Amino acid sequence: MKRAVRVRVNGRDHGHDVDVRATLADFLRDDLALTGTHVGCEHGVCGACTVLLDGEPVRACLILAVQADGHEIGTIEGVAPSGDTLHPIQEAFRAKHGLQCGYCTPGIIMSACAFLKEHPAPADGEIRAMLAGHLCRCTGYHFIVEAIAEAARALAAGPRPTLDPT
Ligand code: FES
Ligand code: FES
């Protein structure tokens, strides 16, 4: 069975008929070709599928696409202000070696977008508590913590990007 869903994703409106059983993650990846949202565990543990739903981080593997009807979604594709400019959080991950294979990275960056809005000058312990919702098999987390701390400093020092999905 299909149902019409209208969502605003990264500032663009989309209308699709979607299978009522389709997850938001599958909808974003398969129907909208936004494959930056990764799928790992598919049961809410790893955080790889994290997107913003009305500005709040959510597991896109645990939400049905039909539940997102009428809502605003932010994905990793909407984070950078342009094709050749990184968002300060992305730039900090690059500069501080906050990623290796990158599979976990989009989800962490989406969580970091929301986290840094509420915690503009986070302590390392607060960053680590936020990261408890994300699994990374590569980095050992230390560089990710440094990247988010660096992103906080960069965001505090300059204006937020105009296309910030949060
Ligand atoms: S794929 Fe959604 S939490 Fe792991
Ligand atoms: S960078 Fe590889 S899983 Fe995190």
Image (cartoon, rainbow, N blue to C red):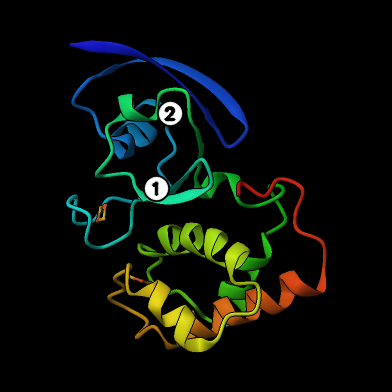
> Would residue 128 be found to the left or right of residue 9 on screen?
left
User: Of callouts 1 and 2, which one flags the residue occurring earlier in the amino acid sequence?
Assistant: 2
Q: Nearer the viewer, residue 60 or 99?
A: 60
Read off the residue under disc 2. Answer: 32
Q: Could you give the CA–CA distance between mark 1 and mark 2, rounded to whole angstroms? A: 11 Å
Say left or right for 163 vs 45. right
Crowd tier of the residue under label 1, counting other residues whose Cα lies within 10 Å: few below 14, some 14–19, many 20 or above: many
Q: Quadrant of the N terminus?
A: top left
- At horizontal 44% and vertical 38% (from top left) the residue drawn is 34
> Residue 72 in the image: x percent, y percent?
52, 33
Name the residue at 23% across, 56% down: 40
Kindly identify which residue carries mark 1. Answer: 37
Residue 88 placement, left or right of 74: right
Provide the secondary structure element on which disc 2 rests: loop
Q: Is residue 47 above or below residue 23?
A: below
Query: What is the tally of numbered marks visible in this picture?
Result: 2
